[in-house]
Amino acid sequence: MSDWCDSLRELPWCPPHRVLLLVWTTIYSIKGQPLALPLGLYAVQLTISWAVLILLSAAHTPGLALLHLLLLFRLVMSTALIWHPINKLATLLLLPYLAWLTVGVSITYHLWRDSLCPEDGPPRGEG
């Protein structure tokens, strides 16, 4: 595509390609303003999800991962509440994600608890 653009004759009044991209991005961002908050929350959720994976697998810090998961749970709940008036199906599709996060929080909590006292852990129920 860039070869094709470079081969075209430039118009004297045409702004540079970067300016065009910036203007188009701004225009489409403004057009989608009602969706900016829900989509922004979703982007933050993705970032925190990656952070949790790094904290658990690379840094081996289940306590920080647990805090991030709890924050992620709140963000998903907020996203669901914000999406509800816009798109009820999108809200319903977040319910399985919340269920999965609940499982993840439970597992991470147990990893964190066991890392605090690995040998003399809290008494467990006899079953």
Image: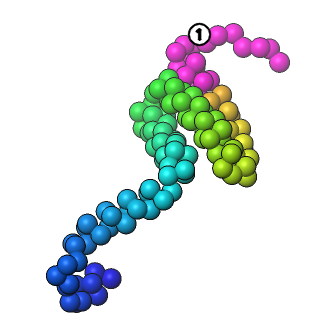
20 or 12, nearer to the observer: 12
Residue 73 lies within the magenta run: no
- The colour scheme of the drawn protein is rainbow
Q: Residue at x 48, y 59 (%)?
A: 31
Stretch in magenta? 108-127
102 or 110, nearer to the observer: 102
Does 101 appear above or below 115? below
Res. 97 image quadrant: top right
Whether residue 3 is visible, yes or no, is no
Does 30 appear above or below 101? below
- Which residue is labeled 1 in the image? 120
Q: Residue at x 22, y 73 (%)?
A: 15
Does 1 appear above or below 45? below
**x then y, percent, for residue 124:** 72, 14
Q: Residue at x 66, y 38 (%)?
A: 81
Would you say 119 lies left or right of 44 here? right
61 or 85, nearer to the observer: 85
**Quarter of the figure with the C terminus:** top right
